[in-house]
Amino acid sequence: MLSFDPYLLLGVDRTASVEDIKTAYRRLARRLHPDANPLSPGAAAQFQDITAAYELLLDPRSRRNYDRESASTPDGPSMTMTVTLSKRAIMPLDEPQVVYLLIEIAPGKHAEKQPERRDSRLNLTLVLDHSNSMNGVRLDRVKAAAQQIIDQLDENDVLSVVGFNDRSHVIIPATTVTDKAALKARVSLMAARGGTEIFRGLEAALEQNLRYLGPRLVNHMLLLTDGNTFGDEEKCLELAQQAADKGISISAMGLGKDWNDRFLDELASRTGGASKFVASSSVVARFLNDHVRSLANVFAERVQVSVAPDPDIYLEAPFKLAPSPQPLDSTQGFMPVGSLQYNRLISVLVQLEIPPGLAEGFRTLARVAVSGDILDQRITKQQLVADVSINVTSNPEPEDPPLPIIDALARLTLYRMQERANEALERGDVVEATRRLERLATRLLEMGEPQLAEQARVEAERVVRTHQLSEMGRKTLKYQTRSLILSASTEDEIP
Amino acid sequence: MRVCPACQHHNREGMLFCEECGQSLQGAATVTLPTRKIGETPPPYGHATWGTARFDENSWIVLHVRDAPQPIVVRPDRQIILGRYDANNAIHPDVDLEAFGALDKGVSRIHASITRNDDTLVLTDLRSANGTLLNGQRLIPEQPRVLRDGDEIRLGKLVLHIYFRGRSEF
């Protein structure tokens, strides 16, 4: 059974005739059909949705049922989506060109006021590394941070805590947070020993989280580790996928320098979670508490974004700018972007490559779809769609790109420069890597980030000398340039 | 495509920042690849109809302030600040527009700069109070735009035109 509005998906009126519906479906299918668009997971996912909508509306009985049901349910709150293009008009050129899309998702009209009482309940599983490397002050601080989190929660929330080294230990089985003192005492008993096998931890954590899994809850797993896991990354990612399919998001925090950032990034991106770098255990409490706070005041959960470019257009580098900057996993038709809070926007920036030799005139570039579960009195699955079009003309009006896109890109570019420096180094191109780091340092200085600029400069020198970056420096540059993106868009708080 | 004014990297048309060095590409010259074959009629697009953006070694900057009898001729140093002299703050812009009614026309003490990059000039608004317009388009502060021969620059309400001239031409 399709849980979205089939009329909206096909872009037809409620009174549309069968002929109208067929025409609308064919028009969309030409753009989204897997045969026309074999490389686009977004198109494939959206094709499934429009086909389901088409089949529902074509069968008179199921259409009547849908009409009756939807007429008897009042309009609840909804999400809104706005899509902004970097240009409204482009010239037809003999070379490829790029257009940026800024997708912003916000709670809609009926949700303007945030409820007094915290509406969203949390089903949180902490997955804490207590391998040998956590010994001493590190583990003490993580325990203290976990205890602070327990203080933040209340009896409406569900908490479980799983510790892991080379095996897993359920420290707090999933339970409502009533006896805080007892829960905190259990956390304090954790001791550091053994190696690091993240899969063990995640597996036990998923089991705990599933016990209270509910559509009205914010189901979340938070992994904290300071080490590399060996050989079980694939299994972890498969598990993350399972979790995502069930509506559980996973965030990952890497403590210190010895963890695999690519792996944790991917783990988070697959599920709509966030991955963060905690440089020192002295700030771990702040990171964890901020993160748990970001899981509260949720308006819609399991929000996903899908971009289906037209068959001749390529989708590049989707990136979530806010609320927590994160590269998105473009291999998924619907890319999970986490929860939508009452007072924050979700914004996503994508790049579209447009081929040479376009005909003049208005044309579509892509279809953008957003879906999510609105946590109201009843859960409403909602999907929004927008068609993005552009005017191709040999004589475009002069226009400046919209400021939010420039702002976001100015900072995203720094993050990408850091990535490109790493790529150069991986190819063994020391000269190129050095040059890129030096340029990054220059730009950072211009942006008013002298400390980070200095770090880039020091790393550039290190590359000249040792042909590699320090792990700490590399992670600092990566995650700090990433968090700069947020400073551009956190001002997006909805007034 | 867009050639980065800082590192000459060739970026795809439509990119807003240089992929290679992070330089803002706004106002960077759009260069159309010469893919046209001999004998073919020129395509109806991609041709600059305005003045050249090329500012070569021997060029000088000539600024015509509207309604002023004499143009201002400037040696193309690396950076030229446009503004108005203010005795209280002892700010000396390279091009002092006080004599052209700058104060009344809303020109800031430090209003905008013209910077030389290899063989182009770029205009940058330096967070002036009343803004800078290039050919009628408002500049985003601190975002450089490439200047072309004959462009109209508006500092507050003060209008001037910029020309690129060889030493012998003025």
Image (cartoon, rainbow, N blue to C red):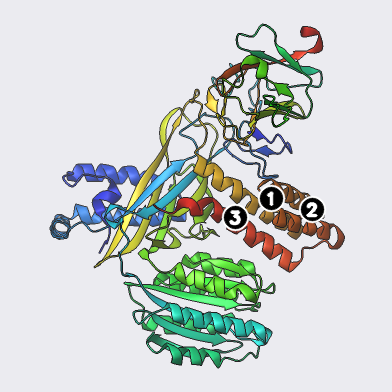
Rounded to the nearest angstrom, the CA distance separating label 2 from label 1 is 15 Å
- Quadrant in which the N terminus of chain A appears: bottom left
**Whether residue A140 is situated above or below residue B120 in the rendered picture:** below
Image position, residue A15 (x, y; %): 16, 45
Judge by depth and name the residue closer to the eye, B157 or A66. B157
> Which residue is identified by label 1?
A444
Which numbered tag is attached to residue A484? Answer: 3
Callout 2 and callout 3 share a chain: yes
Q: Is residue A450 left or right of residue A367?
A: right
| Residue type of the residue flagged with mark 2 | Thr
Q: Is residue A202 visible?
A: no
Q: Is residue B32 visible?
A: yes
Q: In the structure shown, which secondary structural element does the residue marked by tag 3 occupy? A: helix
Q: Is residue A55 left or right of residue A121?
A: left
Image position, residue A346 (x, y; %): 44, 56
- Judged by depth in the image, the label closer to the viewer, 2 or 1, is 1
Which numbered tag is attached to residue A485? Answer: none
Q: Chain of mark 1?
A: A
**Whether residue A375 is situated above or below residue B52 in the rendered picture:** below
Q: In the structure shown, which secondary structural element does the residue marked by tag 1 occupy? A: helix
Rounded to the nearest angstrom, the CA distance separating label 2 from label 3 is 22 Å
> Which residue is identified by label 2?
A434
Near mark 2 (Cα within 10 A), the count class, few <14, some 14-19 or many ≥20, is: many
Image position, residue A184 (x, y; %): 48, 88
**Residue at left offset 55%, top offset 93%:** A189
Callout 1 and callout 3 share a chain: yes
| Residue type of the residue flagged with mark 3 | Leu
Judge by depth and name the residue closer to the eye, A371 or A494. A494
Instruction: Give the mark nearest the N terminus, 2 or 3.
Output: 2
**Residue at left offset 34%, top offset 49%:** A385
Instruction: Give the mark nearest the N terminus, 2 or 1.
Output: 2
Q: Chain of mark 3?
A: A
